[in-house]
């Protein structure tokens, strides 16, 4: 499942600015300018000065958290300039003056009182520029992150739509083909007909309901693939159709129908539909945190006259995009043609 990170880059960057720049740098800057008497054996004297640096900067929170990202999102760049000039030339000086006045009232009779009484003179251009650089960078980081989140959401919605379309395409095609097979079994009076009807019902339930979740258990997905292979084997009883799996950890979850495009391509373009000795063989292996799915089918090429080969590019694009989304830089997808066979393999580091 794709989880929203608790500590994002803008949040960490903002925290570092407040800790290293506002709480420490501004504190030392004001102490140096104030020239207050030293206090022996005290590494952090006059903490009221640190509080002043923090309180005088709080006014910038609406600026970098909401105003600038929102204006940039709307491409109102002239307003960005205007808001920035008003904030740093008008708002900050009056804000500092107000906090200095309050600080002077609260520290009467204390040594640090002189700092607050004259602190407005310490509002200098270099500190103003540093404020602008630090907090405008935070605003840009938040704007970029919001854009990335929005892009990611659009991509996720698009892939979810692709999954829905994949299910929509699969349902009638899969259902009608399987019903035809069941009809043939019923005509011959096969004792396996009830079991295959139940299997079909379970698979349709999985597609219609379970796959609406963002993730399903690897065990459920494996059972679905086993049923799919079993039904295909029933349709082509003389073909070599198999799916080999090892013991699956039921706690592991993956996106639903992740490997289905590769399976469909193999059955769609496999030679087993025309030759009894041909087949489709697949393996699903979980080794540690590495999940490997491999499927091999005998090529249909050269296609016989009158049989058109349908491209399976959309399904392959679908699986690659979903892998990029769910397992960025943690997967390998290879498709090769060796000895008149198509070999597709997906390796995922869970």
Image: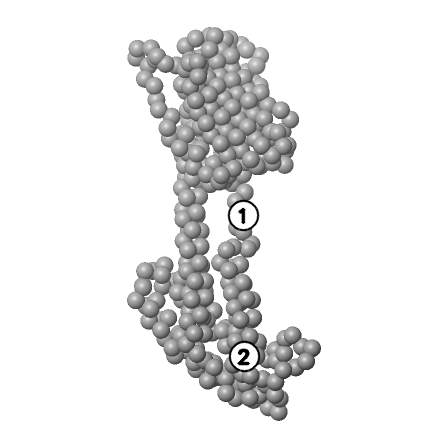
- Does residue 179 appear to the left or right of 288 in the view shown? left
Q: Nearer the viewer, residue 236 or 327?
A: 327
Q: Where is residue 221 drawn, in percent x and y? A: 55, 30
Of the 4 image quadrants, the one containing the N terminus is top right
Q: Residue at x 58, y 26 (%)?
A: 285
* Spatial CA span between label 1 and label 2: 46 Å
Q: Residue at x 44, y 33 (%)?
A: 319
- CB atoms of marks 1 and 2 within 8 Å: no
Disc 1 versus disc 2: nearer the observer: 2
Q: Where is residue 179 drawn, in percent x and y? A: 46, 19
Q: Which numbered disc flags the more N-terminal residue, 1 or 2?
A: 1
Q: Nearer the viewer, residue 62 or 226?
A: 62
Asked if residue 248 can be seen in this view, the reply is yes
- Residue 3 - label: 1
The local secondary structure at tag 1 comes to: loop
Q: Residue at x 49, y 39 (%)?
A: 329
Q: Residues within 10 Å of mark 1 (few under 14, many from 20)?
A: few
The local secondary structure at tag 2 comes to: helix
* Residue found farthest to the right: 41
Q: Where is residue 281 drawn, in percent x and y? A: 51, 17
Q: Which residue is mark 2?
A: 32
């Amino acid at each position: 499942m794709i989880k929203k990170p608790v500590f994002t880059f803008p949040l960490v960057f903002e925290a570092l600015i407040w800790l290293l720049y506002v709480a420490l740098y501004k504190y030392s800057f004001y102490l140096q300018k104030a020239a207050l008497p030293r206090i022996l054996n005290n590494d952090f004297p006059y903490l009221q000065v640190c509080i002043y640096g923090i309180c005088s900067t709080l006014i910038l929170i609406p600026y970098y958290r909401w105003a600038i990202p929102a204006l940039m999102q709307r491409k109102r760049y002239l307003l960005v300039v205007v808001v920035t000039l008003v904030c740093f030339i008008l708002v900050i000086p009056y804000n500092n003056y107000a906090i200095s006045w309050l600080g002077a009232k609260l520290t009467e009779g204390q040594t640090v009182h002189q700092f607050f009484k004259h602190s407005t003179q310490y509002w200098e251009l270099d500190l103003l520029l540093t404020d602008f650089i630090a907090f405008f960078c935070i605003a840009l980081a938040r704007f970029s992150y919001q854009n990335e989140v929005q892009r990611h959401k659009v991509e996720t919605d698009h892939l979810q739509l692709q999954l829905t379309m994949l299910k929509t395409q699969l349902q009638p095609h899969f259902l009608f083909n399987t019903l035809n097979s069941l009809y043939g079994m019923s005509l011959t009076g096969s004792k396996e007909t009830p079991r295959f009807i139940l299997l079909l019902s379970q698979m349709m339930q999985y597609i219609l309901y379970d796959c609406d979740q963002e993730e399903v258990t690897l065990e459920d997905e494996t059972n679905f693939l086993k049923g799919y292979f079993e039904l295909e084997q029933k349709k082509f009883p003389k073909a070599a159709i198999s799916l080999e799996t090892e013991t699956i950890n039921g706690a592991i979850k993956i996106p639903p129908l992740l490997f289905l495009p590769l399976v469909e391509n193999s059955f769609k373009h496999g030679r087993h539909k025309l030759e009894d000795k041909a087949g489709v063989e697949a393996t699903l292996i979980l080794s540690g945190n590495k999940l490997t799915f491999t499927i091999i089918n005998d090529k249909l090429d050269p296609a016989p006259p009158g049989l058109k080969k349908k491209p399976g590019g959309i399904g392959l694009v679908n699986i690659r995009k979903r892998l990029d989304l769910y397992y960025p830089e943690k997967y390998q997808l290879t498709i090769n043609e060796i000895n008149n066979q198509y070999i597709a393999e997906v390796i995922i580091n869970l």
